[in-house]
Amino acid sequence: MSIMNLNSFIYMRHELVLVAVILLFLLAEIVVGSKNKNFTVNFAAGLFLLATAIGFLPIPYGEMFGGMYQTSEVNILMKNVLNVGVLIVFLQSIAWLKKDENEGRITEFFLLIVSTLVGMDYMISAGDFLMFYLGLELATIPMAALAAYQVYSIKSAEAGIKLLLLAALSSGIMLYGVSMLYGANESLYFADLIQNLSNNPLNILGLIFVFSGLAFKISIVPFHFWTADVYEGAPMNVTSYMSVISKASAAFVLMTLLFTVFKQLSQEWTYALYITSVLTMTMGNLFALRQKNIKRYLAFSSIAQAGFIFLGIIAGSQMGMSTVIYFLAIYIFSNLAVFGVAGAIFNQTGKESIDDYNGLYKTNPALALTMTFGLFSLAGIPPVAGFFGKFFLFTAAMESGFLWLTVIAVVNTIISLYYYLLIIKAMYIIPNDQPIEKFSSDFYMKAGLILATVGILSIGFFGGIHNYIFDISFGILN
Amino acid sequence: MDILSLLIVIPVLTLVAIAFSKSYKQVRVIAAIGSGIQLIQSFNLVWQYLQERASGNTATMVFTKSYVWFEKFNIHYDIGVDGISVALIALTGIIVSAGVYASWGVKEQAKEFFIWLILLATGVFGFFIAIDLFTMFVFYEIAVIPMYLLIGVWGSGKKEYSAMKLTLMLMGASAILLVALIGLYLYSDVDGGVRTWNILELAKVTMPIEAQRIFFPMAFVGFGALGALFPFHTWSPDGHASAPTAVSMLHAGVLMKLGGYGALRIAVGLMPEAAQEQAWFFMILTGIGAVYGAFGAIMQTDLKYINAYSSVSHLAMILFAVLMFNVTALNGAVMQMISHGFITALFFSLIGMIYGRTHTRDIYKMGGLMKVMPILAGSYMVASFASLGLPGFSAFVAEMTIFVGAFQNPDIFYRITAVLVTSSIVITAVYILRAAGILLMGPIKNEEFKELSDSVWYEKVTLVILILSITVVGMAPLWLSNMITDSLTPMLQRFAAL
Amino acid sequence: MIQGIGLHEILVVSSLMFFLGIYGFFTRKNLITILMSIELILNSVNINFVAFNKYLYPNMMQGHFFSLFVIAIAAAEAAVAIAIIIDLFRNIKTIDVEKVSTMKN
Amino acid sequence: MEQYIFYILASIILVFSYLTVTSRMILRAAVYLLFVLIATSGIYFMLNYNFLAAVQLTVYAGGIAVLIVFSVLLTSQLNEKMEKVTPVKMLSGGLIAFAGAILTISTITQYEFVANGLAELDPSPKAIGYAMLSYEHNGYVLPFEVISVLLLAAMVGAIVIAKRPAKLLNEDATEVDMSFPTSKDAYKSRTKEEIDSLLK
Amino acid sequence: MDFQYTILIPGLMFLSFVYNILWGRTQAPKIAGLIGTTSILIAAILSYYTAYQYFFNVGLVNGTFQAIIPFKMEWLRFNDLLFIDMGVLLDPISIMMLVVVTTISSMVHIYSFGYMHGDDGFPRFYAFLSLFSFSMLGLVIATNIFQMYVFWELVGVSSFLLIGYYYQKPSAVSAAKKAFIVTRFADFGFLVGILLISYITGTFDFGLLNDPNGAAMTQGAGAGFLGLSVMTWALILMFIGGAGKSAMFPLHIWLPDAMEGPTPVSALIHAATMVVAGVYLVARMFPLFHIAAPDAQQVVLAVGGFTSLFAAVIAITQIDIKRVLAFSTLSQLGYMMAALGASGYGAEEGIGYTASMWHLFTHAMFKALLFLGAGSIIHAVHSNNMTDMGGLRKYMPITHLTFLIGTLAIAGIPPFAGFFSKDEILVALHQSSHLWYWVEVVTAGLTAFYMFRLYFNVFWGENRHYHHAPHESGLAMTFPLMFLAFMAIVSGGFFMFDFGQFISANLVPYDIHIHWDVAGFSIAVAVVGISVATVLYMKPSAIPAKLANAFGPLYKATYNKFYFDEIYLFVTHKIVFGLIARPSAWFDRHVVDGLMNALAWITNLASNSIKGVQSGQLQHYAMSFVTGSVALVLFLLYFMTR
């Protein structure tokens, strides 16, 4: 156990910088007031860009607070990835925030998002279940507020309450599991649990209850039902944030938990993951097939993607972990590209039905192209990055012997390809008398979309990225 | 820049140039220039390859280059060619050029059309030069997916349905294939050593037979679906019927060959033990395909359907030959890929041209076109004769090689299926002549058709390129045959050990 | 330690309370009563933590502190939940949970 | 003696928990919940965790319960009884909860908990205060700080929802467009008919 | 002796074809004709020169004629043993065929100048003629069986193109298709036969296959099927190919229809040259047939014999003059086949072989003559039907005279050519099989009868009222007639032309002499046939109609060619199309494709049927959540205990 001193606070720089950002937001709100929209958004975006940049500084890692907080290279990487994702979300939200309906609530939006991000960062770095739980709640409660952000809309409020109540239930169940783990293993510190945890019924109970709590956040069947409704009801940018950042962080945390704390129970959680991932892929795809609303559609698409993520986790190897992180990074960029375009269109026209996308390519080729890249990436079609992510997930799963799971997964990719192509079809093929008119998005939106597209196009080609991730990953088999 | 990567770089540069061009006229000129350079480069490659072999290089693959891509998976951008891939690259170069001229008349969204078309070509070239399974698969998918938009946007008829069906079936097959490829990779270290995706390395590994039994059918069906293996061929008639001319040409002419090539080089080439064990099953499927495709073609009235079913029949022969495990049949398989590529491209281009004039593809609505458009009709006649395997045209050479090869196996079951497949030459004659007879001969059915014009210059370019290729291969096949046979030697050594 | 009362008795009580909360969550028609059920659930978890701490590992106060933080979070949760519920009520004049289902399928 | 007090508290907890989740009068349910919370704090007292018990009383019983009662008053007619729960729902919910309870309780009761037998740490407010501000192992300054961020965020969140956009209130309007309110007309308060039609 | 120039014989024709097909349209039609005719004349001269050199300058070596291969190149290699060479094989029969083909082809080329004059497709016609000549020449000089197959196919396609020359005429188109498909079907047998033989013997080469002492003779003896050896099966399959090309029963149906082509084409392809390819094939493989697979040879005999009778019977009732000639061709081809089937190997026993080849030679001459004569008549009358003709001898003296010579030749009246060759055939049959001998004697009588029926109907009988008076054709048409008439006289034994000196089964010269016992009888039979025809048809009379009525159904059956066309139509349309092709197309669209669509449909159905799960009800979601957790715990605790 290392001795803590002031210097070691630098380990926590992601969180600290973000908390500072929150404070500066508040300060700016007080000093400048809410009237100056341009200043507010520029300030927020700039500040967050700075925070993101700071995250990338090469700074050491270690543990603090008696093991309650710990960072490692892979944690830092994940936080950086999340930061970049949130940056893109910010850029994509600005046009929406500037609208009349959000008069006087711009700073709050940024503040809530950053605070959930802080929560996720703490969750990632948690060294015991208390911090983990706090991080989880910090990532959830403001999220419900964000989902209910459009106070005039029934759907938004409905989304908020559904998310909050179900999240509370899930965290209640998770807490019950945690309490069992505590009772059986004397400690809530991960380091102690890794030592003490053994294969007994109470631990299995705890494992599953904790797993359920996280599976809820990743939208794993059968804990996923909130996803579609909340995604549909929440404002577009919040949906995008939830589907990307929140899900990615939870998936990552679940993976590290399973790989470290529940290492001894790997056989048990393998079963659980196997069953749920098959269910998730299949159900997600089957529901996505028939959606007409783009947000709802993407909700089910993201559920299906979560099932794929499990392929890497279930592999349990260093390869599995590295591909999961790699996949998550790609997933973030791909989904943000798709959501970005959907958001741009929604902001401009208020349309969010897939039928409205008919003939989009003729009027807005750039948007359609970005969307295409994003969808191809989600579907796993080369040369965009999603293909590499999925391919490696399959490889990792098969490497650990999950042949039939992989076969089920590839069959599911085909179903998913069908509905991804539906949007392609709408944009390029189906004629439309009244297509969405040609419009130009603002600078922020463009920047956000370009960032996402560059990510999609480049991650696959630079093998070094995966190399780096692999080197800092770990598995339970080694 | 090495000679092989140029084959990818040239189309990519063409793509970029097209993306920045202003009008459809510029676009097609750029496309023509780009594909022309690519064609020259393809021939240059053939020449260089023959030189290399003549100079005594007996390596399995020549011009190999290797760049690390994903180190931890041992994935490389590995390229290299042997006689088979060189021949198919030349085929691709020719058909892409012909295809560009065949789409000279595309004006609606011409830029996008050519971009997707050339992207498709890029995928095909990449597939043929790759010797790393992963790289190969990447290019494979790049080649398949543009089909969706090409058919969906520029197609005709039930284009949306057809495009979706085609894409889903092909991608579905490729997904199954993917599992097989990963399986190959994972078992590549059974003899010790590191895991690899490299075909040359994999060829040295003897995969456990239990694993082969799982992965061989996956690989064979995965590639086979693209090669119109019965019963996974149903995307083909609809897809071809809906696709625009150049796309049909490229797809039937080149893309479907990826299936045969992969089945030969990967499914059978790397897992021969299981291939031999399960050959009987797939021989039944291919045998059915060859005969049944031909029978299916007899009753069609849509020109494109006729040709699509004909492709099913002819491509079944490729897969059939691949399962024969002797040099003659394998040689025939590759020859058939090349031959069918040219012939079917010629057919589809002609169908496109005729359709462009008559606005119908129903043979019963046409007739006596020979009188009105002698050049097109004559070319159609040539294509017909070539397709039914007349000497002097490439198909004869290819089919005979396959038949002779198929007969070298004394097993009675092989013999019976071989006879069955051979019988397709009769049925082929029936449907080809039926179509040609109704379409080109007899009285002119529609008065309006008397005013129709014959081919224009760019159509002639297409036709000349293709007919010339067909006859050159048909009349002087020896060099090609030798080039292919040489490259089959390593594979046959592996089979000999069975 | 409560004289004469074993750990299991307390745990049984808390577990029953937990599942009563769950039952309430399943069956109550009013969003606020569902919120109450959640409070029951959290409360039962707290009892678990405290009991474990006291009975098994009294040398540290991990369970105790956990309960403390759970209480705080329950408060925050309740605050936001009630804000949303009231917003919902302003929108649709009801907080019947079955009515809150405009989005489905 | 303690034994009996515990049994009394336990039965209060269980009975009032049950009533909380079944009572058809919403305000009564809130009061029952209050009883449960108070009884819980009684258990804490019995376990000698006085500080925690106090927090339970103030935050839970004093804060949350009041909050709930307050919101009940805001949103419900007090005399109104809630509709009966449909048997299907009751049965299925009950079954699931029952199964869960059986499963967990049987698991717990079969499990032999082993105390570590170490000396008890004095749970005095002072010790708690030290631990709360300690950054060592078993120190809780970090969670303490984090929860302050959480509370801030929750507060902001609650406010942001409660606060309707000032510009858009109290304006006359003619149309209601739920899905995409581009005009401020959309934000007027809705009549019952409109709501009913929207909820269909 | 260096025979390398022989490659020019087909080569010239190929060049002529390429030139005419590519550039023929752009020039005056005459030029195309001239190019074609010049090429074939040069080829003919080269052939004669070759024949002279081969038979007289090179002559016998060790008492036999040697096969010479002056030119050979590898064309396609299958494996170390099997490869296709393209080369020139010179031996007696190939040289004889060169002479026949070039001679007839030259005549037809010249004749067509007159016959096809003014036709739109004149260059095309000459291009196709060149193509045909090239293919046929390539076929006869083939050094190996696969080269033969290559040209065999090309011959087939030229035939298709020429039959369908009047492509706007639906009947011509369907006749062309029929010809091609029927022969293609036969070629399938041929191909499988080749493949079998190549597998058994490991070679395609004629030299190796036909060596009487070679390994090929015994290699296929074992391992049979249905009691016949593999080699027998292989040869029977090959014979099917030959039978298709030579229109043997039951694959004969395409030949009468093939008369839809221009008459010179009928003369060249469907009378004189292409249709004898089957005979030539059997002759080419004769040692193999005779030594390695006598059973197969019996099949040849039976098919040939039956066809000759069958066709002769049908010919009696036909009224289209070209069809009469077509059936007579069938009948004569049957003779040739039967002779080969009856032949032994060498010396007196091998007379059937010699006779067959001789008959091939003479038949080519007189049948071409007859066809060209018929063409001349049709050209004058503008009709094919003999009911539209009569009394033409006054209008067309040269045609009449030459036609009469041809008729006498085919009827087997000495001293015309047909007599000698047919006599040898009858002798050969007499030696080996009495059944088929009698069949052929009857056929000879029938031949004489129906040919004279034709002759009288056309040139005698009553004068018809022609639209414009028929007149004799021009020199371009009459010259070939006269030349061929001359050949029809001299190619027999009139000048003691001893065919056996050049051609025999074992390549050893053999002296032919006329067997007057057999010959006398056959002459008598022929005279009877002629007499009956004279009585019935020389003057208009009512007897033929009465006879036709008297025989009623039999007459009708014969008139309708025993309904073979209808049977084939039934088989192709009702069975192949109706019961195989249409159902398989349906099966593909609905069952196979339906399965793929059903997958999509099922997925959609599943998607729709579970949509209720996402009910929008918060509490259902919660139930699912808890159920999931509890179920997982249950599963892990009680079902997956380790």
Image (cartoon, coloured by chain):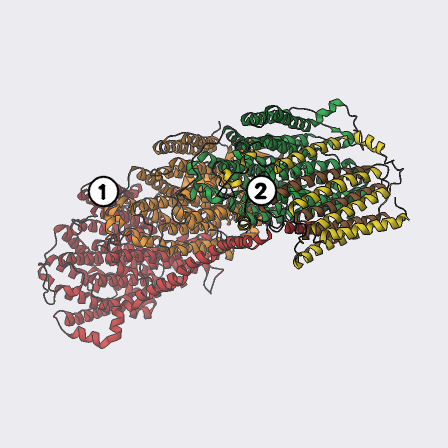
Q: Which image quadrant is residue C57 in?
A: top right
Q: A94 and E111: which one is in front?
A: A94
For residue A251, side relative to residue E473 (left or right): right
Please name the color used to draw chain A. Answer: green
Q: A461 and E257: which one is in front?
A: A461
Residue drawn 75% across the image and 22% down it: A6
Number of numbered discs overlaid on the protein picture: 2
- Dot 2 crowding, Cα within 10 Å, few <14, some 14–19, many 20+: many
For residue B185, side relative to residue E306 (left or right): right
User: Mark 1 falls within which chain?
Assistant: E
Q: Which residue is mark 2?
A: A156
Residue type at mark 1: give it: Gly
Judging by colour alone, the chain drawn in brown in this rendered image is C
Position of residue B43 measured from the top left corner of the image (x, y, whole percent): 41, 33
User: Mark 2 falls within which chain?
Assistant: A
Please name the color used to draw chain E. Answer: red
Please name the color used to draw chain D. Answer: yellow
Q: Which residue is mark 1?
A: E24
Judging by colour alone, the chain drawn in orange in this rendered image is B
Residue D177 tag number: none
Looking at the rendering, in which quadrant would you find the N terminus of chain A?
top right
Which element carries disc 1, helix, strand or loop?
helix
Query: Nearer the observer, disc 1 or disc 2?
Result: 2
Which element carries disc 2, helix, strand or loop?
helix
